Image (spheres, grey):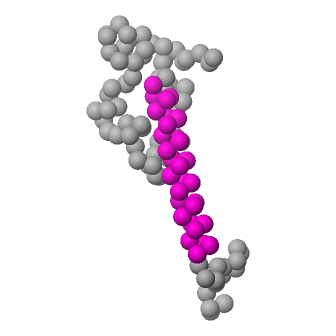
Amino acid sequence: MKAMSPGVVDFLFRQLVAGEPPEDMQWRREGTVLGEQQPGAELARRLAEADLESLTPVELFDYVRAAQRLGAWADRLREAAVAQYCASETPAKPGRHSDASA
């Protein structure tokens, strides 16, 4: 098992002493928390910019769940594009343009 960073240990200790939950509740007051962010470009940006070493165990769990939602969203986009490609009457071959002026 990997050890938590000193910053995370310090945060969790301060939360324990203060009788607060082991997560950063300030995030909830500042905007959409990662676990509630809708799949899309903003979620992808937030996941890419997150510092995994500084996340608490609860935040890390939310990160993993958000990454799973983003992956499922991307799979649905891909499936829709494949269905559209397969449904077209004269699909363009990869690397060739299908317009009549060529």
Position of residue 15 measured from the top left corner of the image (x, y, whole percent): 37, 14
Height in image: 102 above or below 64?
below
Classified by dominant secondary structure, the portion drawn in magenta counts as helix
Decide if residue 61 is on the left or right side of residue 88. Answer: left
Taking the spot 51% from the left edge, 47% from the top edge, the residue there is: 70
Taking the spot 39% from the left edge, 22% from the top edge, the residue there is: 23
Q: Is residue 80 magenta?
A: yes
Q: Quadrant of residue 84?
A: bottom right
Decide if residue 102 is on the left or right side of residue 16. Answer: right
- Looking at the rendered image, the quarter that the N terminus falls into is top right
Instruction: Work out whether residue 7 or residue 27 is closer to the camera in this orientation and state it.
Output: 27
Position of residue 44 measured from the top left corner of the image (x, y, whole percent): 50, 47
- Residues drawn in magenta: 58-87
**Residue 69 visible at all:** yes
Farthest-out residue, top: 17
Q: Is residue 32 magenta?
A: no
Number of numbered discs: 0
- Looking at the rendered image, the quarter that the C terminus falls into is bottom right
Q: Quadrant of residue 5?
A: top right
Q: Quadrant of residue 19?
A: top left
Instruction: Work out whether residue 69 or residue 13 is closer to the camera in this orientation and state it.
Output: 69
Farthest-out residue, left: 29
Position of residue 91 measured from the top left corner of the image (x, y, whole percent): 64, 79
Instruction: Work out whether residue 57 or residue 45 is closer to the camera in this orientation and state it.
Output: 57
Decide if residue 101 is on the left or right side of residue 64. Answer: right
Taking the spot 55% from the left edge, 17% from the top edge, the residue there is: 4
Position of residue 22 measured from the top left corner of the image (x, y, whole percent): 40, 18
**Residue 50 visible at all:** no
Taking the spot 35% from the left edge, 31% from the top edge, the residue there is: 27
